[in-house]
Image (tube, rainbow, N blue to C red):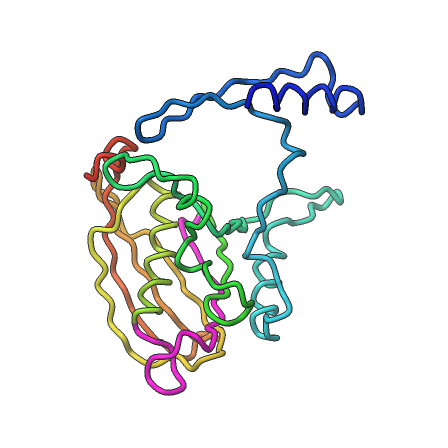
Amino acid sequence: MAWSVGRICKGFLRLGLLSKQTQLIPVTSVSVGTVRTAVTLPSFLFPKPRDFSLPNSSWGLEMMRMYEHYNRQCEVETEGGQKQEGPWQKLPSYNRLLKYATGGVYLSEMIQSKARLFTRNIRNPGAAFEYVLFVNSEEQKCVCVLQAGHLLEGPPGHVHGGAIATMIDTVTGTHATILSGPVMTANLNINYRRPIPLGSTVLLESSLEKKEGRKTFITCRVTSTDGSKLHTETSALFLSISASHLLSGL
């Protein structure tokens, strides 16, 4: 392995893609029964991860309209013509996150390569969860624009209640993490008021209720984009955790 990396690096030096001052940092990774040392190569060798919260061809007019509405508020122009950060910030969304299983067991490379976030594991655009999150730190709010695809059907022509709960947990959990650092869901209390038609676009609006020690209390409403229809109301509780808690299985 070291010999192969050395040859690769020499090739990059000849092509001018690496300078002799470039540092190659050894990184030790542990798998079951083995200790391996790898070398960190320059970032240009690896493709930038895809942000799944950017518009694609499956997005309908209402999804695009709401995306542009909040995206315009991520950057504002001052009186002097300068650009500065606005009240909202768009959060990127990738399709994988975890490398460790409960108990701190390092996953095999095969499992790692196949692991995907539940809400981002459908390759067909528009088939399931199409969503984008924006956060407003000053108001301590988070909003999600969601377009529900045809694979989320529960009642005929409408979104499955479990899929709605998944998105509520995703949005409130992300919001709680921004507010309090690493957290785990302790409780979700969801009141379903009105079904969500498949293919429709809705808003999930998350707000901080209060923080008490390790506890972060969040409320969330799912509504039509114009606010005239209330689909669900939720109260959620999240507990702050440390990385050691997560890896030890709590």
Whether residue 51 sits left or right of residue 211 in the image: it is right
* The N terminus: image quadrant: top right
Q: Is residue 38 above or below residue 50?
A: above
Residue at 46%, 46% in the rendered image: 113
Total residue callouts: 0
Whether residue 19 sits left or right of residue 69 in the image: it is right
The image shows residue 55 at horizontal and vertical percentages of 61, 62
Q: Is residue 74 magenta?
A: no
The image shows residue 79 at horizontal and vertical percentages of 72, 46
Q: Outermost residue toward the right?
A: 15
The image shows residue 110 at horizontal and vertical percentages of 43, 44
The answer to which image quadrant residue 158 occupies is bottom left
Residue at 42%, 60% in the rendered image: 119
Q: Is residue 157 magenta?
A: yes
| Closer to us: 84 or 158 | 158
Q: Is residue 150 above or below residue 174?
A: below
Q: Is residue 171 above or below residue 190?
A: above
Q: Outermost residue toward the top?
A: 21
* The C terminus: image quadrant: top left
Whether residue 221 sits left or right of residue 131 in the image: it is left
Segment colored magenta: 139-161
Q: Outermost residue toward the bottom?
A: 156
The image shows residue 201 at horizontal and vertical percentages of 49, 74
Residue at 26%, 31% in the rendered image: 244
| Closer to us: 127 or 194 | 127
Residue at 22%, 34% in the rendered image: 248
